[in-house]
Amino acid sequence: MISTRSDVERAFKAGNYSDALTQLSGQPQTGFEARMLLDIGLRLRDWNLVERGARDLANCGSPGDRVVGQAYVLYAGRSRSGQATVEEMPVAHGVDKRSAADLAYLKALFAWMDGNAGEARSALRSASPVTTEQRVKVLALQAWSAPTLRQQSELLLAALTRGIEGGVDVGLLGNIAHPLAVLFRELDLAELAPRAEALLTQIPWGRELLPDRFYVERAVAWAMAQRADYIEALRLLDRAAEHALTPAQHALVATDRARICRMAGDSVNVRVAALHAFESLEAIAWEQHLNDEPYAVYTGADILAPVDLERINALIKRADAAMLSSALGAARSPVLPAFRDLAHALVLTNRPEVLRLARRAYRVFHGIGYDYRAANAALRAYDVSGVAHWLSKAQFVARKMPRSILAREVARRSSVLRRLTPRRRELLAAIAEHLTNREIATRLSISENTVKEHIRVLHRLFKVSRRAELAALWLEAKEVA
């Protein structure tokens, strides 16, 4: 070693991995050096570095370290090729408690990677963590094996709390914060939201760029936007854009910016951000089949479609092709296909299969506790069909998240439709028939100025700006009547 053990630990804990690797240059001579090399590889998701550190640990560590090193060699190979199984794990007889806890964690991790959540939970129950890092990792893996997203959120919050209080390295904190940030961004965590935001803002990011930081900054920016702090939200998005590594991530920031501008009533910048998102999405090569690529298309579909329906439809076809690729492991999860279906329901509103897609999206999201998306899908099913049953489902799910923008929107639309007067329903029907103001005035025996005033009131009530949008709302008004 060129530097002292404390220097290496300090650089690793702060996430300054290039410094730590420089100080570890050369062949590791001790179990500490080999384990540090292994841990840096895990934080960077560099499987070659993981395998190198694991092999060194198997050669120069303690008896327990050697067994753990052999297990991590299998893990590195599994992560690259998907070949290793739990049965190949080395036996943990006669090893120290820390090594036994590491092996139990790895056995659970292998079971989770194989899609066997029950076996993963069983292996975790047999784990007896010794260090704070082990306790945090076990909690995080329990979260990933939890049956609902709500339970995942609570366990990830517990893991991140323990990690921050225990002073674990920033890389491990980032690994936990990343999935929590995605859930926090997409779910309505209700009473958990303030705690999640507070924890995410406490992570002491190091100098080096960590991929997890991008997702955390997007989540906190979204929380600020929901509090109507649009300026600070956009500033934080600018910082997230600096940490974006791929065109898909740049597209995610652009669609976030468009959403926040729309929430703030800034229609000009909505269009500018949507066009930037198109440019980023069209630059994606797709051969890597990263999860972010289809996700960026599906989640941005409702923002992008009004700008250019033809281009978003072309992108959705590319995203669907990527989803069907065997290289995209996340396609086996119900979440991303449901995003795809909901995007189709949002965009392709003139197709007969829209209601079926919206129904399927509702079932999948509701089944995994994804309340925000479930309510959104039910609302879209109601938009398409005009059947009050779907509005009732949207209201039922939205009651679980009273603080959310979507819940307020469901309640507002329900109230507006209930209170719509007969004369305004007649006017909506006339607008849906594409009659001019003069023709509407003649049909309803009122003046053109009265027609214009009614239309201004309807625009304000439904928060829309075009006659075409009022015409689309006629199905809702007719059904409620």
Image (tube, rainbow, N blue to C red):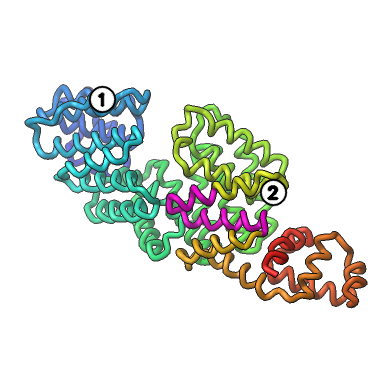
The residue that appears at 67% across and 40% down in the rendered structure is 313
The residue that appears at 30% across and 24% down in the rendered structure is 84
**What x and y, as percent, mark residue 33?**
19, 31
- Is residue 365 one of those drawn in magenta? yes
Task: Let me know if residue 382 appears in the view.
Answer: yes
Badge 2 amino acid: Thr
Instruction: Determine the image quadrant of residue 442.
Output: bottom right
Quadrant where the N terminus sits is top left
Quadrant where the C terminus sits is bottom right
Q: Mark 2 vs mark 1: which is more N-terminal? A: 1
Number of marks in the rendered image: 2
Residue 365 or 20: which is nearer the viewer?
365
Query: In the rendered image, which residue does mark 1 sit on?
Result: 73
The residue that appears at 64% across and 37% down in the rendered structure is 315
Query: In the rendered image, which residue does mark 2 sit on?
Result: 349
Instruction: Determine the image quadrant of residue 112.
Output: top left
Few, some or many C-alpha atoms within 10 Å of disc 1 (few <14, some 14-19, many ≥20)?
many
Q: Mark 1 falls on what kind of element?
A: helix
Task: Let me know if residue 14 appears in the view.
Answer: no
In the rendering, which numbered label is found on residue 81? none
8 with respect to 234 (left or right): left
As drawn, which residue projects farthest toward the left?
94
- Is residue 7 one of those drawn in magenta? no
Marks 2/1: CA–CA distance? 50 Å
Residue 242 or 259: which is nearer the viewer?
259
Residue 183 or 116: which is nearer the viewer?
116
Few, some or many C-alpha atoms within 10 Å of disc 2 (few <14, some 14-19, many ≥20)?
some
**What x and y, as percent, mark residue 375?**
53, 58
- Magenta segment, prevailing SS (helix, strand or loop): helix
Badge 1 amino acid: Val
Q: Which residues are magenta?
A: 361-386
